[in-house]
Amino acid sequence: MIQAPKGTYDVLPEDVERRRVLTGHAERILGAAGYRRIETPAFESTELFARGVGEATDIVQKEMYSFDDGGGRSLTLRPEGTAPVCRAYIEHGMHKLPQPVKLWYLSSFFRAENPQKGRYRQFWQVGAEVIGSGSPETDAELIVLLAELLEAMGVRAARLRIASLGQPETRGAYREELTAYLRAHENELSAEVRARIDLNPMRAFDASDPGTQAVMANAPKLLDRLAPEDAEHFAQVRGLLNCADIAYELDPTLVRGLDYYTRTVFEFTSDALGAQSGVGGGGRYDRLIEQLGGQPTPGIGWAAGLERILLAAPELPVAADVVDLLVTVADRDSRDAFQAAFVVSREARRAGLAAQLELTGRSLKSALKHADRIQARYVAIVNDGEQTSLKDMSSGEQKELATGAVIAAILRGHSL
Ligand code: AMP
């Protein structure tokens, strides 16, 4: 048996309804705030992600599905949505539009990660980006919109953490300071943290051993090293979140896995999820457009995982599909009856009814059972081209009609 590749999954018809609810909320919430939907291609030049996401990130180092297009060009299945949206902004000259340009997307993404619950190799994200505004109101608006989406979906136990990463120069200097601090306390750190001092000193903040934790309690924090303009921007964002009654935790150790962030970063997690607790997050990327070849233009965005939202949201009562009419034949040997049934089902749909044609050739008795199972309101039993019995499934009443009168009878809501 051929199975779907590891880390991928099928969206079966019964799964579609919950996804549609999520799409509907995203459309409503983001649309009302003036965000317009964009879709970019599933693959892009590898260079876009190398330059945009950052050569040194886990995503670019280990997680990209890259391939040769046959003509010597390297393409990559998109691992994230921000770099492609920025590419599209530049490519389509969107800087000429009234600024900022507010966009949202709902697309699939691909990362060669170790699959587990909530972590897949093909997954879906709903995301929003605002390009062309550096104001703190933009940061706060985006956070509020994601909070609204999670609330509308009933995501349980959601927590918001925020921080500011300042500018890359500040970050570079801070990294050196932290590395020197860790070196000075090397003997008190766990072996694991010690081994990673140069590679990723920030990881030391996540360590669980008491020795490292004691050292980290007094470690310098990036938030205390921000340049005055960045600190002011962050203070304004926090003030706006307070005005909007959005609860958050300041997390000086919040680092996101992409290089392009500047200033505000944020992440929603849900305690209802297991190890993969991140529901959605994002941040400001004021240098990215320029890095990709555009004019210096500030930007900010977020992405939230569809699967994670659905895992953290309560089950929805699933509404049964509406079936107004099932069309079948009385005599399975009558070609005329089949033709007439075919026409009735087609015309019923053109008249706006949810009408299904009985396609298996099952007996009348078993077709009626099937109608019960799919909760059809009416069954039309075409006797021959001319005559049809219309059965009201709720009352059990049956009436003989001219075949051509069946649809009108249903539309009139005829009690037979
Ligand atoms: P990131 O850009 O990595 O912060 O991802 C944003 C959101 O996408 C995360 O908070 C998750 O909800 C979701 N996500 C990221 N990677 C995966 C994955 N491999 N499988 C499922 N969801 C993911």
Image (cartoon, rainbow, N blue to C red):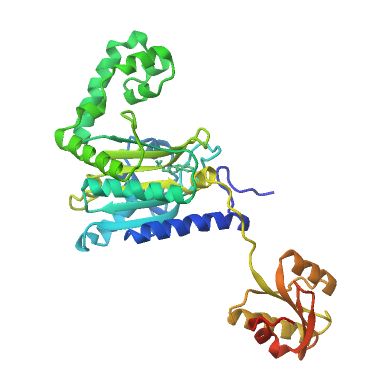
The furthest residue to the left: 228
The answer to whether 40 is drawn above or below residue 140 in the figure is below
Q: Is residue 191 visible?
A: yes
Question: Could you tell me which residue is drawn at 31 percent across and 61 percent down?
Answer: 34
- Viewer-nearest residue: 40 or 37: 37
Q: Is residue 70 visible?
A: no
Ligand 1 found in image quarter: top left
- Viewer-nearest residue: 187 or 374: 374
x then y, percent, for residue 394: 75, 71
Quadrant, the C terminus? bottom right
Q: Quadrant of residue 370?
A: bottom right
- Viewer-nearest residue: 378 or 1: 378
Left or right of 413, for residue 62: left
x then y, percent, for residue 351: 59, 82
x then y, percent, for residue 333: 84, 82
The answer to whether 17 is drawn above or below residue 342 in the figure is above
x then y, percent, for residue 340: 72, 86
Q: Quadrant of residue 97?
A: bottom left
Question: Could you tell me which residue is drawn at 30 percent across and 42 percent down?
Answer: 241
- Viewer-nearest residue: 383 or 378: 378
